[in-house]
Image: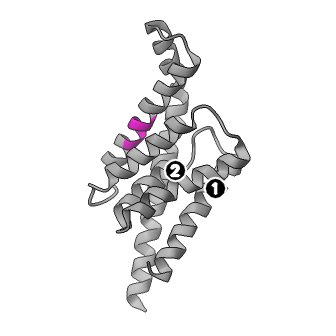
Amino acid sequence: MSRIEMNAVFGLILIAILTRLLPHPPNFAPITSIALFSGIHFSNKRIALLIPLVGMFISDLFLGIHLLMPVIYLSFTLISVFSFYLDKLSLTSVLAASSFFFLISNLGVWYFFYPLTWVGFTSCFVAAIPFFATALAGDLFYSAALQFSFKKVNQISLSL
């Protein structure tokens, strides 16, 4: 792995950690975007899988270990694997990843914290809608920021 790639790996992990630790609206974080971006742009897929998970784990050490960690981490792992099959980051891929995370994470919330009934299921998912709105906004924002930054860095490096 080149020095530039290593810097990108550490930079993405640092972004993940800082944005989760600094005040922000609920679920407005870059982890989904980082999972997608890493899977698309890094040829070493093991590293691409680890980037969002390491960022999550380090920040979770400060924020707190919780019951849903396996579900959340599995969601981001599957989003990274999904991104291995993409050519580029697009609106469709961000919407799909955001929706997938919403579905999987809330199935976990329902299983652990709600009655395992139809009423519990619908109550859980209805209560989660505001969190989906901010998560989607964050995913769109950070995906655009990562993609824009990547293009600019490539333009600069090509002109040197």
Which kind of residue does numbered mark 2 sit on?
A: Ile
Magenta residues span 97-101
Secondary structure category for the residue under label 1? helix
Secondary structure category for the residue under label 2? helix
Does residue 103 sit above or below 76 in this rendering?
Answer: above
Percent across and percent down for residue 160 are: 43, 92
Q: Residue 124, which numbered label?
A: none
Does residue 124 sit above or below 92 in this rendering?
Answer: above
Secondary structure mostly taken by the magenta-highlighted segment of the chain: helix
Q: Residue at x 39, y 36 (%)?
A: 100
Percent across and percent down for residue 86 are: 27, 56
Percent across and percent down for residue 145 are: 48, 60
Task: Answer whether residue 54 is magenta in the image.
Answer: no
- Report the side of 19 relative to 41 (left or right): right
Which residue was labeled with disc 1? 17
Q: Residue 31, which numbered label?
A: 2
Q: Residue at x 53, y 52 (%)?
A: 53
Percent across and percent down for residue 140 are: 45, 49
Query: Is the residue marked by circle 2 packed among few (<14), some (14-19), or many (20+) residues within 10 Å?
Result: many
Is there a contact, CB below 8 Å, between mark 2 and mark 1? no
* CA separation in Å, label 2 and label 1: 9 Å
Which kind of residue does numbered mark 1 sit on?
A: Ile
Q: Nearer the viewer, residue 76 or 138?
A: 76
Query: Is the residue marked by circle 1 packed among few (<14), some (14-19), or many (20+) residues within 10 Å?
Result: many
Q: Nearer the viewer, residue 116 or 148?
A: 116
Q: Residue at x 51, y 20 (%)?
A: 111
